[in-house]
Image: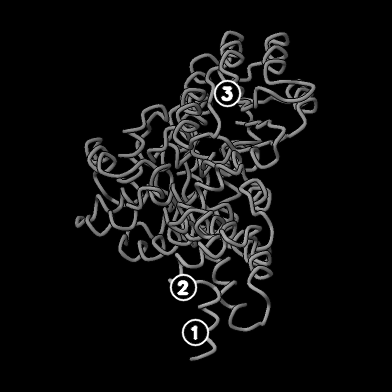
Amino acid sequence: MRLLIVDDGHYVVEYMKHLLDWKTFGIHQIETMTNSIEARDLLTQNHIDILITDIRMPEVSGIDLLKHIHQHSLPTKVIILSGYSEFEYAQQGIRLGALDYLLKPVDKDDVEKAMSKAIKNITKTRPTQPIVWENFDGLAYLLSLLGQNETLRKQYDAYTEFLGEHRFCCFKLEGFTPEHEDVIKRTVGDKLDRLVWTAGTRLFALIPEEAAGELTIKLERSVVSPPFSLTDRNVIRQMFYRFILNEDVHSEDFISIFNHSPSCGDWESAGNIIKKYDQIHLRQPKIIFLMETILYVYLSDKDHDTSETVDWMFNQLGQPDELWSTLMDRVSRIRNNKQMSIQTIVDKVQTYIEDHLSHGLSLDELGKVAHLHPVYFSKLFKQETGENVSNYISKKRLEKASQLLQDSELRVNDIARMVGYRKNQYFIQLFKVEYGVTPYQYRRNMIHK
């Protein structure tokens, strides 16, 4: 699905763009715009599933975009951003068909709730999705059948409905050659060849029942499972684990794992994924848990290697403890990369503060440096450093002042101005609170040491 975020503030659209893991909502393309006129044109020319828009913008407002969507009978679902003073305006938006409105500064939990509401509305009201095979990721589809991510499953509902008209079999072949792969792909056709995977010298596939008989004749070392429908998730799971790993699983086995595990979208924030594995002692639940972890990595790691994922699923899953060491490293790396992106923003602003202590250093100024809304940045800074921005600035100013008092002969009032204090008496007062003495006493004490 496609998401469009529109706000005339650059920092707002950047903040919104990185606020959530949008893929967990089935969003695979995000457009951001600060020009609402261009946004209106994009809505007309391209299929946009969800629009998040500021309500008050120059030239074309969020209300205007809503009216445009209504007049052109566009399927786009709309979430409005507004301030407290624009409440009546936001109500007008709801009357025009907006699904929800969020008050600025926007809270992450509120956005998640609004998105869930929008996704639910789309799945209820939208007609059956067209089958677009160019967008069909066979491995993601298999993971949607085996895993617990509901958003991913819904993304492939149209394909399941289409493919559910036929019965399928699991297929495997040991010691395959490229020629074998060609035979299989020619037999199943140019669309279902996306459900064929190779891992080392082994080949696995989901193939229509009618093709299974033909292939077992052509390929002597091939094995097929009993036929089943792709619309029955429990049967698919049971068949996969029995056929690939020789494990008998039942629907309650999945319930017990997933009831005690965070959903895919929550794993990282809950911090449970690594600790949870150590609490599982039996082979079968370990394997089920690892399959969900593989799904998490596949969706979260933008640089994932598909062949590596296939190898995990078909070759390594049978040795869960060995595979876990690889997956634990990957999960940690995903978490660290996301944490690093936040830390990079904080580091950048901290460096800016230390280089510009003579400036006013308002939240607006620092928000522009971070490309985030000032209020959002303030929350982020406190979350990452454990202290308020204003406290950090004050601490750095006084540290710099103490250094200048030791290393220079500058007058106290000049030092005060160099570190951003226009009122000398205020500077002296803050310095005494921090160091227990006035700047003059501090310098004298340093000289006599």
Indicate the amino acid at tag 2. Answer: Val
Going by the picture, which residue comes out furthest to the left? Answer: 281
Of callouts 3 and 2, the N-terminal one:
3
Q: Secondary structure at mark 3?
A: strand
- Disc 1 to disc 3: CB gap under 8 Å: no
Q: Position of residue 16 (x, y in %)?
A: 59, 38
- Disc 3 to disc 2: CB gap under 8 Å: no
- Disc 1 to disc 2: CB gap under 8 Å: yes
Indicate the amino acid at tag 3. Answer: Ile
Please state which of residues 316 and 329 is positioned toward the viewer in this rendering.
329
Of callouts 1 and 3, the N-terminal one:
3
Gap between marks 1 and 3 measured at Cα: 61 Å
Please state which of residues 282 and 280 is positioned toward the viewer in this rendering.
280
Q: Residue at x 49, y 35 (%)?
A: 107
In the image: residue 246, left or right of residue 402: left
Q: Residue at x 48, y 37 (%)?
A: 108
Gap between marks 1 and 2 measured at Cα: 10 Å
The residue indicated by pointer 3 is 79
In the image: residue 254, left or right of residue 8: left
Q: Position of residue 369 (x, y in %)?
A: 67, 53
Of callouts 1 and 2, the N-terminal one:
2
